[in-house]
Image (cartoon, rainbow, N blue to C red):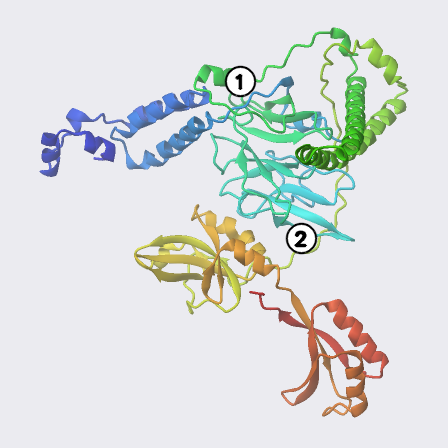
Amino acid sequence: MNFSLSHILSLPVAALLALAAGFDVSAQNTDTLSVEQFRRKLAEVESLRKSYNFPGAMDLCAEIEDSVFPDSLSKELSEISLLSSNGENMMDFCSSPVAVAKKRFSVKDFFLHYPLRDRSWRKTPNVLDTLGGSVAPAVYFEEGDKEIFFSATEQDGTRNIFRTAWRDTVWSAPELVSESTTSPSEEIFPMVSPDGNNLYFASKGLFGMGGYDLYVSSKDPKTGEWGVPVNMGFPYSSPYDDFLYAVTDDFKYAVFASNRECGPGSDSVYVYVLEYDASPVRKRITSPAELLSLSKLAPKSVSSASSSSGNTKIDSYMNLYSSVSDLRERISAYSGRMEEVRSSLSSASSDKRESLLSELTKMEQEIPLLQDSLTKSTARLQDHEMDLLSEGIVIDPIKEMRKRNTSQTVAFSFPSMKIGPDPDIRILKPEPVFDYTFQVLAEGRYALDNTLPEGLVYQLQLFSQQTKAEVSKLGGLSPVFFREEPGKVVHTAGVFRTYKDALANLPKARKTFKSAFIVAFLDGKSVTVARARELERTIHEMFLIRIYPSDGANLSAAARSAVSAVSDLDLVRVSDSGTVSYILGNFDSKEEAESTAKTLRSAGLANVNVESAGLSSPKI
């Protein structure tokens, strides 16, 4: 018989005495739920949660918790209670975006109706996402992009967000975007804002309300690292599946998809088009009915039917033409205002001057972004125009705008894009991204030597408890280390020389230990991960030049003079298993070492090789 703590504390003294004496008081004071009754109650909770009545769902969860039910069902109650609690907390952070349009599409190709660049969606599986799947049937990247963010399925079946960057002739080996964007569940449909400052994606495993929620992570302008993702809240996220949030190049629209209005088992989603708001006002909504109404994102009415031509391609062209015109007007207005500000600076008071300088700086930062958006939008407009010309359609946009009664609201027309060609991407074969000793086995293993190596290392902290854990509790990880601290024994796994290696292996640890996180040590002493990453940036590979004497014993005086002439680094004679060589080093780069070696060869030294000297020590 199970009793919750809250129930036990609520019992009268007589009942507590009876309970202590071994008498069964549950029949008189506690409801006992059969599996069928428990399931029925849980279905009620789910109904309340999906109706946005999170407080009601929480109350019913508490009622169920005060009942007696089989232990095997506790996890289900805990999971739905957490989602309901998250939803209730998110009621404090609701925004009210202006809805422009919404339309229902098949889940198989809904993404082709986003106002993005045509032929930039690539079907999966492909070289980036080798497994693909119905949950993410395509990857988005435009021709000419130098950086691609994508979701891919790992060997354990979960999806994480990866990044690859152009490296002159090949693409870099894919790597996880960051520790904070990785969860034990799935992350899909990453999209970067047109200015490159925000990364939007959907996740099932981060703080959310159920299904996929929408998140945004902002880039640190100093380090280039992506910050902790934030749930975008109502009405973007919901108790249903919400995904693929994107911002158009002109920052006019924000678009995302959801199955919130499609019914259970539906194979379709709604695509919602909103006016983009860079800084939405957040407010608390306490009424479930108001929250439900907000989540439907009903579009504002269109006041003129003449705003649509009936041809979606022409409408798409005109919408883009309007966006290009708006961008040109904004750039022109900014330029004019900047001239006014500059002319006012010389005669402005000190207080006014500071204000004008601040305004000028902001506009100087904004104009390149607007110009970039204009360039991209103009290119898209030209592509649309060529498509129309190929079908024999010639448009005079000025006349078309006059026909449409521009004083009225222009209707949004969903485009019909085409899938682009299979990506022709050559990716560097990834070097091993984790220490070869870190493994997931049938049974975990402790490290034979529990001492951490010298230098900077990262580990995955798994859990703490009062005593050293049994091997069966290690989740198959190897090697596992332990260290004793006051009142507890901390268990960590793996030894990684770079943060990237630790991050790549973090999802494996979180499969068993959901709260696992990265920790760092320098010469066996704990340091913050931030400090470790700062130190890691000072570490780089060193190189040396190895010279073999022609007589196998000693360098001639002429050879020594040649070395002294091209370098003031130390020259050391070494003997390894009877083989004599001279080492010149260390060089900070391979290029510097190769250049010196080339000069030595031209001076007559024949046997000259460039070798790695290992990693430099962190600069403390």
Between circles 2 and 1, the one closer to the viewer is: 1
Residue 560 higher or lower than 405, as above or below: below
Image position of 560 (left or right of 150): right
The amino acid beneath tag 2 is: Ala
Residue at the spot 75% in from the left edge and 34% down from the top edge: 345
Marker disc for residue 294: 1
Residue 75 visible in the picture: yes
**Quadrant, the C terminus:** bottom right
Q: Quadrant of residue 415?
A: top right
Q: Residue 185, image x and y in percent? A: 50, 40
Mark 1: secondary structure: helix
Residue at the spot 77% in from the left edge and 26% down from the top edge: 330
Marker disc for residue 465: none
Image position of 233 (left or right of 461): right
Mark 2: secondary structure: loop
The amino acid beneath tag 1 is: Leu
Callout 1: few (<14), some (14-19), or many (20+) C-alpha neighbours within 10 Å?
some
Residue 74 higher or lower than 523, as above or below: above
Q: Quadrant of residue 109?
A: top right
Q: Which residue is mark 2?
A: 173
Q: Residue 578, image x and y in percent? A: 65, 90
